[in-house]
Amino acid sequence: MTHAPDSSVILITGTSSGIGLHAAIAAARAGHTVVATMRNLEGARALRDAATDAEVSLDIRRLDVTEPHAATDAVAGTIDRHGRLDALINNAGSGRLGTIENSTVDDVRAVMEVNFFGVVALTRAALPLLRGSTGRLITVSSVGGAIGQPFNEAYCAAKFAVEGFMESLAPVAATAGVSVTVVEPGAVTSSFVANVGRDLNQSGLANDPYAAALEAYLARAASSFGSAQSARSAGEIVAALLDGDRPPFRVQTSEAARQFVAAKLADLDGGVVQRMTATWLA
């Protein structure tokens, strides 16, 4: 892979599909050198095909954010090959649909490992390089990082943790010249949604006592994803945060996401959100 000596080097996690794939392509098209990582390189075909169609080059590497030393190895490998790191986009994530009574603590821990501790590990490994380049730390969260949603307890807990971590880190990182941004997509069409919803009957979630509430929630979710934002649109918004003025701390990727998050930020006693989410289960 060739790139200009002064081109910005971007490390992105979770690029096999969805927002991560499109963010990687958009960043490369904008002239950045992109290190695109994913848990399993057997899933790289869609990304490679997209890069061919866009006529861009990517440095595609394996990275499972839950593995010990994976974060430090990924950053070290980027420096060894490209000599610098100007931005980290934490995008890798996984969901789990279910309520705690029908889940195990290990199920919750697994979601936290990918969505939270993976982000923490990559951030810790990348910050010394981002300080050197006065770079950008961008993390794809979710509107579920602002509003807790029924049957998404583990996922929303992880995204809440990410946003609390980044909101606390942002002013500290800013003193060293590093900007911190969390991106909050709403409903996005991607394989992520299908992966969360599969095998519900085998998971036990369809059993009493929450069967009626789950059925209502799934119907509402299916309706919302019928008008979802495209993964390409969301990915391009993420990539655009690499250029121009330093972005704000919190960015939503659609008007629907902005309105959704705004309800929480103005809801001092929590009543508005509770009344809203209760209607999803009726």
Image (tube, rainbow, N blue to C red):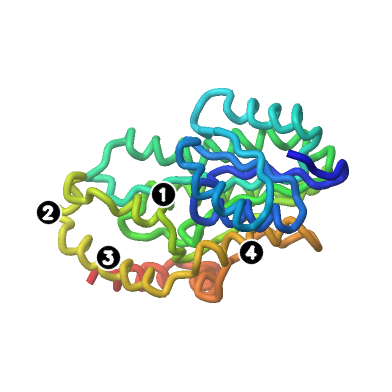
Q: How dense is the environment of label 2, judged by Cα within 10 Å: few (below 14), some, or many (20 and up)? A: few
Report, in whole angstroms, how far the alpha carbon at label 4 lies from the one at label 3. Answer: 28 Å
Kindly check if marks 2 and 3 are in contact, taking CB atoms under 8 A apart as contact: no
Q: Nearer the viewer, residue 97 or 27?
A: 27
Q: Which mark is residue 155?
A: 1
Q: Residue at x 59, y 59 (%)?
A: 235
Tell me the residue that label 3 is attached to: 217
Mark 1: secondary structure: helix
Mark 4: secondary structure: helix
Q: Position of residue 13 (x, y in %)?
A: 58, 43
| Left or right, 214 with reference to 71 | left
Q: Position of residue 272 (x, y in %)?
A: 42, 73
Residue 14 appearing in the image: yes
Tell me the residue that label 4 is attached to: 237
Q: How dense is the environment of label 3, judged by Cα within 10 Å: few (below 14), some, or many (20 and up)? A: many
Report, in whole angstroms, how far the alpha carbon at label 1 lies from the one at label 3. Answer: 16 Å
Report, in whole angstroms, how far the alpha carbon at label 2 lies from the one at label 3. Answer: 15 Å
Q: Which image quarter is the C terminus in?
A: bottom left
Which sits earlier in the primary sequence, circle 4 or circle 1? 1
Q: The residue under label 4 is which amino acid type?
A: Ile
